[in-house]
Structure formats: C-alpha cells, structure tokens
Image (cartoon, helix red, strand yellow):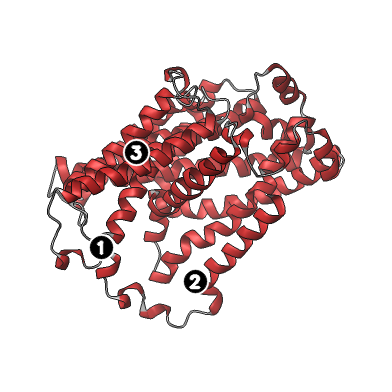
Amino acid sequence: MRRFGPGAHLVNAISFAVAQVLIAGINLFLLAKIVEVLLGWPLVVALLVAGVIVLAYITLGGLSAAIYNEVLQFFVIVAALTPLTIIALNQAGGWSGLSNRISDPEQMTAWPGNELVGFDSSVLTAIGLVFGLGFVLSFGYWTTNFVEVQRAMASKSMNNARRTPIVGAFPKMFIPFIVIVPGMLAAVLVPEVRQGKASGDVDFNNSLLYLMRDLLPNGMLGLAIAGLLASFMAGMAANISSFNTVFSYDIWQDYVVKNREDGYYLRVGRIVTVIATVAAMGTALIASQYSNLMDYLQLLFSFFNAPLFATFILGMFWKRMTATAGWVGLVSGTLTAVVIAVLSEDAFGEFSLGVLPLTGQGASFVAAGVAFLVDVVISYVVTMAGRPKPEGELVGLVYSLTPKENFHDPRDAHDAWYQRPGVLASIALVLVIGLNIVFG
C-alpha cells in the first residue's frame, strides 16, 4: 500500500486470496487422499470430514496452533519416513540396486532434468530450471509467499524475522531423502505404480502412500499417517488463516466496510474462514484432476508468485518505479502466465489448447520466467511515462533510501554467531552447492 498505493494493493490482495483458496484445496485433497487410500473411505466423504476437522482446528487454535503444528509435524514425518526409506532401499538392493532397476539412467541425476521439465533440449531445460524455477519461483516463494512472510511477521526481532526463511531452508534441503527417494523406490517396488508406468496411466500422488501401506508395520504406519495428516492440516490451516487475514483487513476493511471496531472484523474473519474452507473443498476437486500435484502447484506459483516477485524486487531496488506500474505490471505478468498455460499441451488440464510444445512443470517454469520478464518490461515502460514519488516518501520502502541502522534491532546485538542470519545463510549455501555436486 505505502509503496504502490491502493491499485497494486487491491490487485495483489485479490490475487493472493484466490491463490490461497486454490492451494488450500491441494492440501485438503492430499489430506483426504490419505484417508481414501489407507482407510478406504470415498474421496468425497474424506474431503468433508477433513474439511470439518481443519475448520475446527483453525477456529480453536489460530495462528499459534498452525506454527506449532508445522514444527512438530516435521519431526513426526522424519521419524516415520526415514525408516520407510531405509526399509525400501533394503528391499530394492540398496542404492546400486535401485539404480539398476530404474530403466532410464537420467532419472538418477538432477541434471540436465529433461524428464522433469519435458524439453528435448538440455539447454532449454537448464534455462527453465535455473531461471524459471531456481530464480523466479524459488526466490518468489521465499520472499513474497504470505504463508512464509506471516511467520516472519510473528517474530520478536529483526534477526528472528531474517532467520525465518533461512532456518526453514535447512530441513527443506533434506526432504528429498524422505520424499523423492521413496517415490523412486515406489516406482520399482509397488505393483500399482509399476503397472501404471507400463500402461502410461499412473497416479503419482499415491506412490508414497502405497509404499507406506506395503512396507511399514502397523505402529510405524500409524505414525506415518499421523505425520502426513498433520503436515497437510498445517498447510491448509496456514492457507486459510492467510486468506482470512488478507480478506478481512486488506480487502474488506480497506475497500468495503471501513472504520469499524475490531470485534466486527473479527466476526468477518470467522465467517470468511468457514466460506474459504467450503471453497477449498471445491478447489480440492480441481486438484484431483492432476496425476502429479507438483505440476499443478508449480502452475499456481507461476500465476501468482512470479509476477509478485518481479514487482516486489523492482519496487525494493528501483526508486523511480511508479504506483501505476506496480499494479499494471502485476496484472500483465499474471495474464501472461495464464495465457502460456492455456496455450501449452497439458499444464491447464482440459483447458490447454496444445499450441505450444510445453508440458507439465516445464510449462510452469516457462510461464513463470516469461511472466517475470513481462512484468519487468511493462513496469519499466509505464514508469517511464509517469512521475515517481518523492524520495522522502520512500524511506523504509526502497533499499537505497533506507538508513542502514534500520536493518538492525538493538535486541539482536548479543546474538551468538550461530544465530546471525549471514552465518546461517552462508552455511546453507555451502550445503546446497555440496548436495548439487554430489547428486547432480
């Protein structure tokens, strides 16, 4: 609002609200899928029951419950899925046995990644992965995704806020060992997945669940189910609470009903929480149409995160950028990503026209990269035709105009070395490079 005015603020608020309902549907669908596959309930019944449970959890627990659950469920999932990986690797004959049983050797390496992106050219694949995914989508996720930003905003000091995404990056690096590796093992150990791959009709969303079902003993299976349920419940709770916050205060309070007491907006928040949960049950059915939910999730990020990241980064480092450029760039970038998805072969499901030879996540990476570039170009053109804000109004909003002492909090002066964001970020960078060298 302060940097680009009400135009960009409203566009971003509406875009964000829509994104959260769609992503909440993904978490709800996965939550219901666990119940369907492992307990045998019909998907619609599982969706209804899961939606009611999450609604009660959000209403009673609020943001604090969501944050605590996110932390605890991570350790539960690690405790359950680490043995699964070990047991499955042993069944497959170790890493060498898995390598020998994977039909395509390229699937055992991260590069060039043609199988993931769906491009025949390794050069285009590298551009899609490095620019579309590695820069636009990844940076956009960690810096503009409100679910992540909300956690930082709940911090008690500047260093705590800066540490939020960095600390989250450490466990994120090791998730492939308990998610991607078991998925590869499922492709060679689980009959349903092997048969699906042979016929070309495989639902990748069920791979991990089938592997858990076949290999884990009852006690460990219960722990794994509890961890996954908690994970998707925490994800959906974060999406719904973020939607609640943005709709109540950034849309309803600012543009619909202004200057009312806090109790009124609290009631509005409770009502929209129910509405958003019901809407998520509908968007969960959209998610159910995708055999690989990562394709759908990356597509949504290309629609909503990529343009926002472009506007965010320009506004932070380019003091001349105007308010009009802010909302025009956002709209242009989002529409560009949607158009590319529609013109692709299958990224938008049955709505895709097949004009462009882009499939799966590759289409999402291209959409994200092009949306970012279009946002930047349109923002530049519009800015050059307008008049920028006075520099005095941009202090604290533009990096070059903000006093450097504002970046630090006196309460952080006595932090130990391992609590300093710069040190933690450096360690994370070294680990990322090392893991890419080993597994690349």
Q: Amino acid at mark 2?
A: Gly
208 to the left or right of 369 = right
User: Residue 403 at what x, y percent from top left?
Assistant: 27, 75
Q: Which residue is painted at 46% across and 36% down in the image?
A: 366
* Residue on which disc 2 sits: 422
Residue 405: x percent and y percent? 31, 78
Instruction: Estimate the spatial distance between the alpha carbons at disc 1 and disc 2, rounded to whole Å.
Output: 22 Å
The residue where tag 3 is placed is 273
- Please tell me which of labels 1 and 2 falls first in the chain: 1
Res. 296 in view: yes
User: Mark 3 and 1 residues: CB-CB less than 8 Å, in contact?
Assistant: no
Q: Is residue 274 left or right of residue 120?
A: left
N-term-proximal mark, 3 vs 1: 3
Q: From mark 3 to mark 1, how far is it between C-alphas?
A: 31 Å
Look at mark 1 in the image and give the residue it sits on: 397
Task: Please state which of the two labelled residues, at mark 3 or mark 1, is closer to the viewer.
Answer: 1
The amino acid pointed to by label 3 is: Thr
